[in-house]
């Protein structure tokens, strides 16, 4: 190995520079995770009859049900709308998280590294 760097690394990047870059990426990741946890993702189902909101920690933070959606003879439909709205809000949170992670890592797939 050449002094001060790794063979085959562009520009002879040394270990200290790599560590500094990794630390910056970790700090950026922690900041992004904190921002994501404080964001709210909303979705609706049944033509807006049921609305759900989740945060970045995948916690349900609000649920609105239009009184017109409450039919004692068809509780299953209301249950389906609640499930659909919550799942769609969760998907929105996951998509935003994946997009932010991709932007942070420059599109690199780091697997379970972070």
Image (cartoon, grey):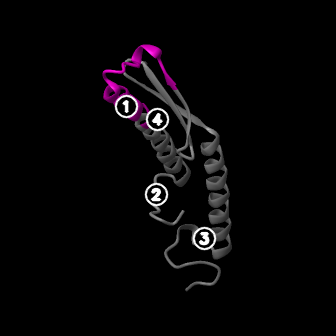
Label 2 sits on residue = 108
Residue 77 position in % (x across, y down): 32, 26
Report helix, strand or loop for mark 4: helix
Task: Give the number of the mark in front: 2 or 4.
Answer: 4
> Rounded to the nearest whole Å, what is the CA distance between mark 2 and mark 1?
40 Å
CB within 8 Å, label 2 to label 3: no
> Rounded to the nearest whole Å, what is the CA distance between mark 4 and mark 1?
16 Å
Residue 101 position in % (x across, y down): 52, 50
Residue 29 position in % (x across, y down): 61, 54
Which is more N-terminal, label 1 or label 3? 3
Q: Is residue 109 left or right of residue 104?
A: left
> Rounded to the nearest whole Å, what is the CA distance between mark 2 and mark 3?
18 Å
Nearer to me, 91 or 95: 91
Q: Is residue 66 magenta?
A: yes
Which is more N-terminal, label 4 or label 3? 3
**Residue at 49% across, 30% down:** 52
Label 4 sits on residue = 89
Label 1 sits on residue = 79
Report helix, strand or loop for mark 2: loop
> Rounded to the nearest whole Å, what is the CA distance between mark 3 and mark 1?
57 Å
């Amino acid at each position: 190995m050449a002094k001060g760097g790794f063979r085959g690394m562009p520009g002879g990047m040394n270990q200290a520079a790599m560590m500094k870059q990794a630390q910056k990426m970790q700090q950026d990741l922690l900041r992004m995770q904190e921002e994501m946890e404080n964001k709210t993702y909303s979705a609706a189902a049944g033509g807006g009859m049921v609305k759900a909101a989740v945060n970045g920690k995948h916690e349900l933070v609000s649920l609105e049900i239009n009184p017109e959606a409450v039919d004692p003879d068809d509780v299953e439909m209301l249950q389906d709308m609640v499930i659909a709205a919550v799942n769609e809000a969760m998907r929105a949170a996951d998509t935003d998280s994946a997009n932010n992670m991709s932007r942070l890592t420059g599109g690199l797939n780091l697997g379970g590294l972070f």
